[in-house]
Image (cartoon, rainbow, N blue to C red):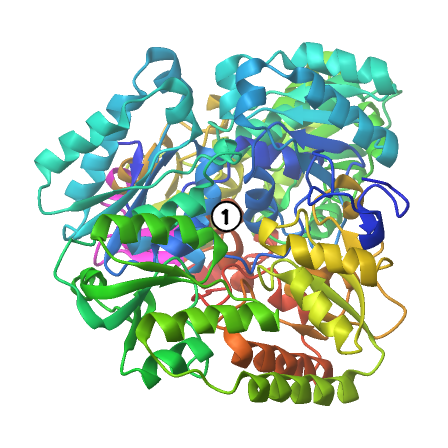
Amino acid sequence: MLKRLGPSALTAGETTSTALFPSKLEFNAPVHGTWNIVHIGMLVPEAHQIYVCALNCMRGVVLTAAEMGALDRFSCVVLKEEDITRGTVEQITLDGIRDVLHKLPKLPPCVIVFPVCTHLFLGVPMGRVYRQLEAEFPQVDFVRGFMDPISKKRLIPDKRLRKVMYDPLPVVEPDDSLVTLLGSEFAPDEDSDLRKILRSGGLRLASIHDCKTYEEFLGLARAGTIVSVFPSGEWGARKTAERLGRPHLYLPATFDYEQIEGQEGQLFDFFGLPYPDFAAERASCDEELAETLAVVGDAPIAIDAVVHPRPLELARLLIEHGFNVREVYLDGVNEEEAAALDWLREHAPELELSSTILPDLRVAPRTRQEKTLAIGPKAAWFTGTGYFVNLVYGGGLWGFAGVRSMARLMREAWRSEKDTRDIVPRKGLGCVSCI
Amino acid sequence: MRRTNRIVPTYTGDVSGACSALFELGGMVVIHDPSGCNSTYNTHDETRWYDQDSLIFITGLVERDAILGNDEKLVADVVDAARELSPRFIALCNSPIPFISGTDFAAICRLVERACHIPCFYVRTNGMHDYVVGAGNAFAQVAGRFVEEAPVRRGVLNILGATPLDLGIAGSDATLRDFAADAGFEVSSCWAMGSSLDELARAAEAEVNLVVSATGLKAAQVLRERFGTPYVTGLPVGAFAGELACALRRAASDGRCAWPHRDARAQRGEAPWALVGEPVMAGSLACAVERELGVAARVLCPLEAQGELVGAADAFVEGEEGVAEALLGAEVIVADELYRPIVGAGTRLVALPHQALSGRNGWKTAQDPTQIDVRSLA
């Protein structure tokens, strides 16, 4: 962890491990396109979320719901000092949830409950709370969420939620023509390789994004196979598949041609489908990238880790195709990208890797002298450009089609300036936003 | 049950209140929190975050450090950042877990101050109170630590309790300064929009302090105690502005505090108008409603403001249920739009965005509360 570029950046050549930066005070950039646990929970149709926490902790989640225009699906139970000093946190949690359910105009089929760090530290027996609630409201599925960011070194809240939100799925007979995607905020694009491959085998891909009712949501359990493509959703999808007794294929979206071929080969083998001409797919991607290079030229490019879980692979892909990638904004390297970091260390040692949270970034210059293309909203904010790809978590990109889509998005971004000030502070890209 | 909100959001918390109060003063605010407090604050409670750099950070507290009491890391991280960024002061804020574990912030402040020679103080917060408490404690710390003795200058006042959480839009302090000028006063400092820490430090030169929101009251009390400066509560709204100006001149002359936002109304419990929100702003608007529309109005305060700001016929209300019960019988309700779901059928809601409740949802319709056309509310 050398500091040639200052405390918050280093070059790829200076890296010695996937841990890039020390743990320090943290700054939060005004870029909020990523999803939080409220956005994710809202994917469960007809579900009602109840948070049990202190005022300051409540504010971020309740206003997320407000900005989604979804306060009718969100309720609060406020914890106070006296609950801690008198030891009544368990009782207020139970009474509060019960009170909310009695006040709702109609009992929801599913309630996602979010206790917090306070419950964890005080050892509140949430199992007992849930047993009581389930006895009183047998027609409701109580989902055991948690908003405990203090546990981030173990199981972070959104990762846990991506599992527990599927706990109501019942164990049913499998329908082998159905494949269910779990653990992603975005469904794969219609033209993604994943959908095309499954269609070619007469299979249907279902996901929570298609479900309008809770009944339809429960129907996701019928899938003969579970797939997941998003790293933070893998654990939950795997656990759900185990519980339902289904095979699980983890096929994380990637920009590495060999990995794409490996994953697609896995699908072809699993479903007994004929292999396509991968060479043609590679050539098609190369053509698309060449077309983009002709448009973007030698312009500096900055990438962030918000845009896709594999920012270093994207950097490698672009550098290999002649692009001038200067910066990548990320706070750590996912182990799945260790090979990409190794490649960059050797082949692009001057590539700058910058933190997004270290304190000096609050006052770091956020302008660039040259017109800059940013791939990701955070990179746009840090470089002060209006030319950026506005995407989070890789959107619906997957497979070779995903590579081509990214190349197209880069061309579009380069040609049409966006209003960064207006766009990047909006929460939960792809969700309803009232602001 | 008063602790549950079925559909109405909760107000800004104390930590965000402290950050908002100190935002423009050139200090560094550090929230001892795992995650979320900074994002919550800058997303929903801070209108200035995108355009103005202010040193507000979290410590990123993790479970292990909270349990084992690794305060050395907290001190080291704060000192590192302070040495790098050279803030005018360092303010530490608490959150629920360090509150539970009894983190000794006073001692930590001493260690930090000793290590980097920058004033460091603790703003009493724990995430479990609303912004009035947090901002009030922050302003009180500034009043107690930074304001220096100074000869009183005639015709000078300070404005206390001005944050975007109540005033809605950044820059609305300008209209307060205009009001002061019209009332015959020069503004020494505005706590804390558009004034530097150095200007706040000269606050003792004022003849009188104008408290424009509940967040400014504790600082006013500290300045009263330290320098004998009287304070007057109120926001210049419509026809009430003239009375407020008179009250300021009177206080400057006789040295006595006054609460015209509270006392210039009939204080009738059966008032047909109910105003829900921050008590100084709501009380001032209620006064203007009485003057300009000829109807009695009462204030319902859902915040942890001090009792002296709430009149005999006004009421403190707790939670959504408390507000809903208190609204029964009102003909017209003036409140944030997000209260609409609990307003009864047949009752008219006049929606006025309150940043501390609806956050960014109200930005498109936000207006400077001193510029409200009271007659248009009829």
- For mark 1, what is the residue? B288
B370 lies left or right of B52? left
Quadrant position of residue A349? bottom right
Say what secondary structure mark 1 lies in.
helix
A65 lies left or right of A316? left
Determine the chain carrying the residue at label 1.
B
Give the quadrant of the N terminus of chain A: top right
Quadrant position of residue B349? bottom left
Image coordinates of residue B340 in percent, x first then y, are 32, 55
B134 lies left or right of B53? left
In this orientation, which residue lies closer to the viewer: B193 or A201?
A201
B290 lies left or right of B329? right
The vertical placement of A88 against A197, above or below, is: above
Image coordinates of residue A390 in percent, x first then y, are 61, 70
Image coordinates of residue A236 in percent, x first then y, are 36, 49
Q: How many marks?
A: 1
Residue at position x 77%, y 52% in the image: A354
| Number of residues whose C-alpha sits closer than 10 Å to that of mark 1, classed few (under 14), some (14–19) or many (20 or more) | many
Residue at position x 84%, y 16% in the image: B115
A172 magenta-colored: no
In this orientation, which residue lies closer to the viewer: A403 or A264?
A264
The vertical placement of A307 against B131, above or below, is: below
Residue at position x 58%, y 54% in the image: A336
Image coordinates of residue B105 in percent, x first then y, are 65, 15
Amino acid type for the residue under numbered disc 1: Ala
Q: Which residues are magenta?
A: B325-350
